[in-house]
Image (cartoon, rainbow, N blue to C red):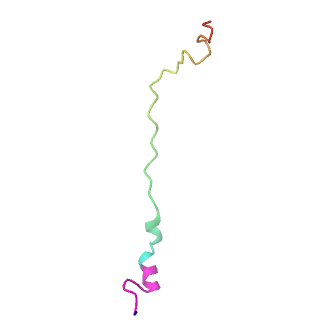
Amino acid sequence: MGAKRYSIPVDELVAGSRVPVTEQVEVHAEPQQPAPDRSTGVHPYGDGMSADADGD
């Protein structure tokens, strides 16, 4: 058994895997505002005024 078929020197591996610092920076787009809520803000059953178990 001689040299392994797919082996490469460590220096070549490291040189091929390094990414320059300037290319490591991810540029983000400006943050977007969430879409406005379509509700009117009124929750007719959210205030405890709905009927309970006995119907009152």
Find residue 32 and report its horizontal and vertical position in percent: 44, 42
Looking at the image, residue 29 sits to the left or right of residue 45; the answer is left
Direction left: furthest residue? 5
Find residue 52 and report its horizontal and vertical position in percent: 62, 12
Direction front: furthest residue? 1
Direction top: furthest residue? 56
9 in magenta: yes
Who's the residue at 40% across and 87% down the image?
A: 4
Find residue 53 and report its horizontal and vertical position in percent: 62, 12
| Region of the chain picked out in magenta, as a range | 2-15
Between 30 and 55, the residue placed more toward the observer is 55
Find residue 44 and report its horizontal and vertical position in percent: 54, 15
Between 46 and 41, the residue placed more toward the observer is 46
Q: How many marks?
A: 0
Relative to 20, say whether 42 is above or below. above
Who's the residue at 36% across and 86% down the image?
A: 5
Between 28 and 8, the residue placed more toward the observer is 8
Looking at the image, residue 45 sits to the left or right of residue 25; the answer is right
Relative to 49, say whether 13 is above or below. below
Quarter of the image where the N terminus is located: bottom left
Looking at the image, residue 25 sits to the left or right of residue 50; the answer is left
Relative to 52, say whether 23 is above or below. below
Direction bottom: furthest residue? 2
Who's the residue at 45% across and 68% down the image?
A: 22
55 in magenta: no
Quadrant of the rendered image containing residue 6? bottom left
Quarter of the image where the C terminus is located: top right
Quadrant of the rendered image containing residue 49? top right
